[in-house]
């Protein structure tokens, strides 16, 4: 038993106050030394501080990925909400199943069928947005030191989660057809030769965030083949698949392979992110673990949000609403690309066929992160490419989002961006 013989000493040794143990001179958080090692990646970046400035109304922000929810008629949501409260109030206000509302799980099958996916409602787990599904999945699979393979670049907040479980993120390059199969083979071989444990491939095959590219049909089966040959589970994150412009994208990976793919969907982009409702479709055994992890983390997803979405899907023309969103985003993308062509004709960028993002490549000697303070001063913001790599790559890139600002603002934003870039080149 510990013997406290005087204040501040234990068994004769001097102890310091809890949390103050490792507080370093330049870190003012008194609990600095107490945080778990896995939280090291949770530091707020300097980019984040700039984004606080970038949210001022005079700044055109091409940085965030906020859906344009104003394109959703308010009464579509309030009608669904009122009906839920009238008809199922006590259920909506109560705890529910850790797997999610049965009816909504069945309705997600209708949504996924639009992307060629067949599944069973019993294999669907409702989560608090797909972000939460990423968290649960990582908790289930990642041990410290495991490798997660992801596209380079990849979704920033997925990488934050992977790192918080102390995974190493290995980026495999993409080209205009998405992830490059040959590069994937090479990376897997190298990682295996180094004795690494590869836990899964995290991929956003359709309308990639941040790259704006889509994995071609031919490559989809090839990537799955490589994953199968190497016993690597595939985590397919597909928030944007239904937001295509002219042409439907190739069918989801999950439609080609059910045993080795966990599919993540969300209502954040086809309805509204404020509900915080997404889902995972997983092979039986993984589905079971996901439910247990969901219960352990949050007991159950929001009954209220789930029932309102379920009611909305039942009574509203949700497919027409998705078409409305598609039209809005297509117009904005075309505006952004024509402004880029006009103001920055010498640069290169991706031409997304759906989704929210354009990936711009700067001339050799420019650095998007270093340039951001100047851009914000000139009242335009973007996300530097480095945010999307776990290893500091991406300095010559930036992500430009066309989802939220109006077409007029997008033009103004690109004009300002061009003046910043040209100014840097003249230096
Ligand atoms: N995955 C990707 C690729 C995303 O872009 C986003 C949202 N920006 C998410 C997951 C999280 O979406 P949500 O939690 O709102 O479903």
Image (spheres, rainbow, N blue to C red):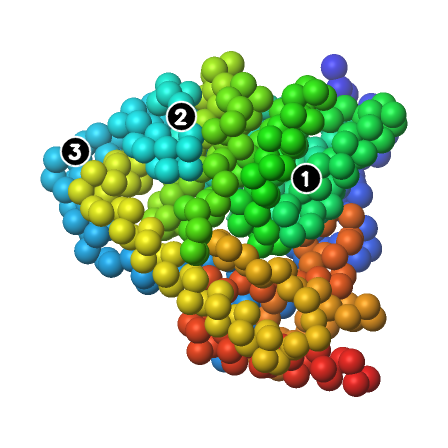
Looking at the picture, tell me which residue is in the foreground, 149 or 253. Answer: 253
* Image marks 3 and 2: residues in contact by CB distance under 8 Å: no
The location of residue 284, given as percent across then percent down, is: 47, 15
Looking at the picture, tell me which residue is in the foreground, 177 or 145. Answer: 177
Q: Secondary structure at mark 1?
A: strand
Q: Is residue 184 visible?
A: yes
Position of 425 with respect to 73 (left or right) is right
Residue that protrudes farthest toward the front in the picture:
218
- Residue displayed at 67% across by 42% down: 179
State the quadrant of the N terminus: top right
Q: Which residue is mark 2?
A: 118
- Residue displayed at 65% across by 77% down: 344
- In this view, 108 is above or below 417: above
Q: Say whether disc 3 or disc 2 marks the residue closer to the N-terminus.
A: 3
Position of 398 with respect to 58 (left or right) is right
Residue that protrudes farthest toward the left in the picture:
86
The location of residue 242, given as percent across then percent down, is: 41, 46
- In front: mark 1 or mark 2? 2
- Residue displayed at 23% across by 43% down: 312
Q: Which residue is mark 3?
A: 88
* Image marks 3 and 1: residues in contact by CB distance under 8 Å: no
CA distance for labels 3 and 1: 42 Å
């Amino acid at each position: 038993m510990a013997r406290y013989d005087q204040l501040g000493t234990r068994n004769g040794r001097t102890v310091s106050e809890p949390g103050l143990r490792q507080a370093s001179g330049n870190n003012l958080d008194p609990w600095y030394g107490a945080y778990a090692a896995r939280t090291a990646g949770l530091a707020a970046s300097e980019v984040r501080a700039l984004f606080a400035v970038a949210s001022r109304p005079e700044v055109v922000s091409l940085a965030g990925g906020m859906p344009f929810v104003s394109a959703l008629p308010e009464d579509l949501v309030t009608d669904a909400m009122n009906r839920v409260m009238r008809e199922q109030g006590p259920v909506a206000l109560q705890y529910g199943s850790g797997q999610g509302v049965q009816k909504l799980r069945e309705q997600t099958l209708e949504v996924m069928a639009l992307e060629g996916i067949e599944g069973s409602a019993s294999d669907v787990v409702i989560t608090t947005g797909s972000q939460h599904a990423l968290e649960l999945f990582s908790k289930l699979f990642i041990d410290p030191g495991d490798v997660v393979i992801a596209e380079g670049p990849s979704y920033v907040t997925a990488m934050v989660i992977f790192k918080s479980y102390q995974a190493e993120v290995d980026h495999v390059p993409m080209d205009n057809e998405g992830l490059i199969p040959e590069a994937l083979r090479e990376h897997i071989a190298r990682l295996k030769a180094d004795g690494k444990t590869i836990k899964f491939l995290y991929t956003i095959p359709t309308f990639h965030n941040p790259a704006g590219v889509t994995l071609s049909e031919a490559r989809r089966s090839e990537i799955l083949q490589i994953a199968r040959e190497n016993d690597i589970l595939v985590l397919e994150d597909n928030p944007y698949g239904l937001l295509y412009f002219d042409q439907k994208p190739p069918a989801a990976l999950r439609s080609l392979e059910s045993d080795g793919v966990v599919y993540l969907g969300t209502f954040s982009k086809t309805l509204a992110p404020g509900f915080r409702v997404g889902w995972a479709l997983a092979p039986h055994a993984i589905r079971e673990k996901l439910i247990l992890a969901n219960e352990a983390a949050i007991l159950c997803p929001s009954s209220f949000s789930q029932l309102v979405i379920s009611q909305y899907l039942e009574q509203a023309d949700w497919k027409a609403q998705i078409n409305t969103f598609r039209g809005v985003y297509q117009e904005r993308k075309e505006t952004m690309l024509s402004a880029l062509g006009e103001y920055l004709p010498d640069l290169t960028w991706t031409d997304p066929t759906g989704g929210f993002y354009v990936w711009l490549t700067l001339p050799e000697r420019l650095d998007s992160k270093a340039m951001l303070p100047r851009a914000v001063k000139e009242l335009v913001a973007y996300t530097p490419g480095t945010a999307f790599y776990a290893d500091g790559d991406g300095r010559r890139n930036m992500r430009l989002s066309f989802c939220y600002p109006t077409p007029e603002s997008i033009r103004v934003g690109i004009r300002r961006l061009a003046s910043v870039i040209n100014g840097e080149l003249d230096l």
